[in-house]
Image: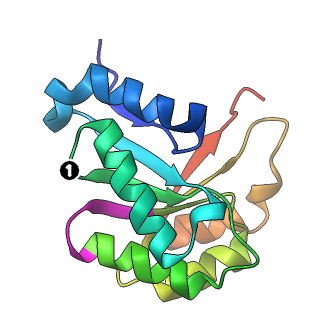
């Protein structure tokens, strides 16, 4: 019916969302865009690689178009997270790097640690939640980083 962008995460229904999506889209893979997220509890280098492999198995694909860090993890330095994301990008296993729920300071730091640029930041944005308009949204517009809104109807 024209829908071609699917957003999921390894934590949604403990991977069930990815498995369900894989069941319904495996024969459409070339025609759709899949975004998924790694949870902050897995944002070490080894954790990301392990969870990524589980995600692509569930999704029945060999790549993810847009792969996000779901939330910042204040206990794990971003350089370790970026190392795994850079490796996945360089190997063609992901098409783009994304972050989710990152404020401007964290987005800038993440952007500096990736080989290519961070392509997207997924944040809460609606008519009732507009605080990103002060600094994050203008930065994203200037730097051609896609802002993906979640809960747009609040």
Q: Quadrant of the N terminus?
A: top left
What quarter of the picture does the C terminus occupy? top right
**Residues shaded magenta:** 90-97
Residue 105 vs 57, above or below: the answer is below
Q: Which residue is at 72% across, 44% downward?
A: 125
Question: Who is closer to the viewer here, 43 or 98?
Answer: 43
Residue nearest the observer in this picture, 73 or 58: 58
* Residue 83 point in image, percent of width and height: 43, 83
Rendering quarter of residue 124:
top right
Residue 102 falls left or right of residue 47:
right
Name the secondary structure under disc 1: loop
Residue at which label 1 appears: 62
**Residue 68: where, in percent of width, then height?**
50, 58
Location of residue 85 in the rendering, given as x and y in whole percent from the top left corner: 41, 73
Whether 85 is among the magenta residues is: no
Q: Residue at x 69, y 57 (%)?
A: 101
User: At x 48% / y 77%, what residue is drawn?
Assistant: 45
Q: Please provide percent x and percent y for residue 13.
A: 58, 31
Residue found 29% across the figure and 23% down from its top: 23
Q: Quadrant of residue 105?
A: bottom right
Answer left or right for 149 relative to 129: left
Q: Residues within 10 Å of mark 1 (few under 14, many from 20)?
A: few
Of all residues, the one furthest to the top in this rendering is 1
């Amino acid at each position: 019916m024209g829908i071609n962008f699917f957003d999921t995460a390894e934590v949604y229904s403990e991977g069930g969302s990815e498995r369900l999506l894989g069941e319904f889209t495996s024969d459409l893979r070339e025609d759709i865009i899949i975004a998924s997220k790694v949870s902050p509890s897995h944002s070490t280098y080894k954790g990301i690689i392990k969870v990524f492999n589980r995600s692509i198995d569930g999704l029945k694909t060999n790549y993810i178009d847009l792969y996000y860090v779901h939330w910042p993890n204040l206990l794990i330095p971003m350089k370790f997270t970026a190392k795994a994301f850079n490796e996945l990008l360089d190997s063609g296993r992901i098409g783009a790097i994304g972050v989710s729920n990152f404020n401007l300071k964290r987005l800038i730091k993440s952007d500096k640690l990736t080989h290519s640029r961070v392509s997207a930041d997924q944040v809460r944005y609606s008519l009732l939640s507009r605080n990103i308009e002060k600094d994050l949204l203008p930065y994203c517009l200037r730097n051609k980083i896609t802002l993906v809104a979640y809960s747009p109807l609040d």
